[in-house]
Image (cartoon, helix red, strand yellow):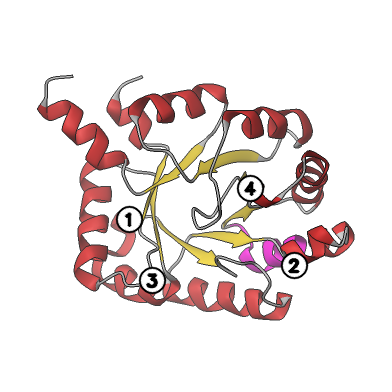
Amino acid sequence: MNNSDILSHVDHTLLKANASWEEIKTLCEEAIKFGTASVCIPPAFVKLVHETYGKTINICTVIGFPLGYSVTAAKVSEIQQADRDGCTEFDMVVNLTDVKNSNFDRVTAEIAELKKTAGNKILKVIIETCYLTEAEKIALCGCVSDAKADYIKTSTGFGTAGATLEDVRLFKKHISKDVKIKAAGGIRSKDDMIAFLNEGCDRLGTSSAIKILSGEESKGY
């Protein structure tokens, strides 16, 4: 798997609290140059990125991020605003308080409402695996599938741990055929990226892919 193939699956990400416009511009210009799947950026930058780069870039943003316990109406409003600002993909965080109370019908209903709001644009559902039991992960595969979201995503990158191959394998057993997988959090090497893609992930969320792969190219790898 060559570097271009890998990068075509990467959501080039910058979500730190103190991100500057200069850093966001660098992220976007790298994404355009190297052909990443998208940039994943804070909602506050979506409109400016869209105005600056237009249709040359696929813009992803986060919803209810990173803790997920915003009420559904607030998450709906976030999607509506990001949509108006030019966003094309949304990565939402499930309400983990509902998960821990086994209110999976509410989780499904919220995801379905957000997918309805997103329409034909991509909705990825972050379940934050580091906080979940195996039974909860399996139940959430059902929620994401039943709500007809486009992706299930492992992690925010702000939790206590990130993606694991074991969780990706578990997802594959329990999601519907129409749901894709995004791994995020702790992906820090080319070997990591290849392993997750080979395991069946369609997207990878990482801030370091271009740096890692560009460094390899400069060394002649």
Identify the mark nearer the N-term, 4 or 3. 3
Say which quarter of the image contains residue 69: bottom right
Residue receiving disc 4: 130
Residues at marks 4 and 1, CA–CA distance in whole angstroms: 31 Å
Instruction: Select label 4 or label 1 by which is in front.
Output: 4
129 is higher (above) or lower (below) than 70: above
Amino acid at dot 3 = Ala
Helix, strand or loop under label 3: loop
Return the disc, 4 or 2, that comes first in the chain's sequence.
2
In screen coordinates, is 201 left or right of 5? right
Which quadrant holds the N terminus? top left
- The circle on residue 17 is 3
Q: CA distance from mark 3 to mark 2?
A: 27 Å
Q: Label 4 sits on what residue type?
A: Cys
Q: Which residue is mark 1?
A: 57
Q: Residue at position x 34%, y 43% from top?
A: 36
Q: CA distance from mark 4 to mark 3?
A: 21 Å
Q: Residue 123 in the image: state x and y as whole percent.
A: 60, 56
Task: Decide which of tag 3 and tag 2 comes sooner along the chain.
Answer: 3
Q: Which residues are magenta?
A: 110-120
- Of label 4 and label 1, which has the lower sequence position? 1
Do callouts 3 and 2 mark residues in contact (Cβ within 8 Å)? no
Residue at x 73% of width, y 48% of height: 132
Q: Residues within 10 Å of mark 2 (few under 14, many from 20)?
A: some
Q: CA distance from mark 1 to mark 3?
A: 22 Å
Q: Which mark is residue 113?
A: 2
Residue type at mark 2 is Glu
Question: Residue 38's x, y, as percent?
Answer: 39, 51
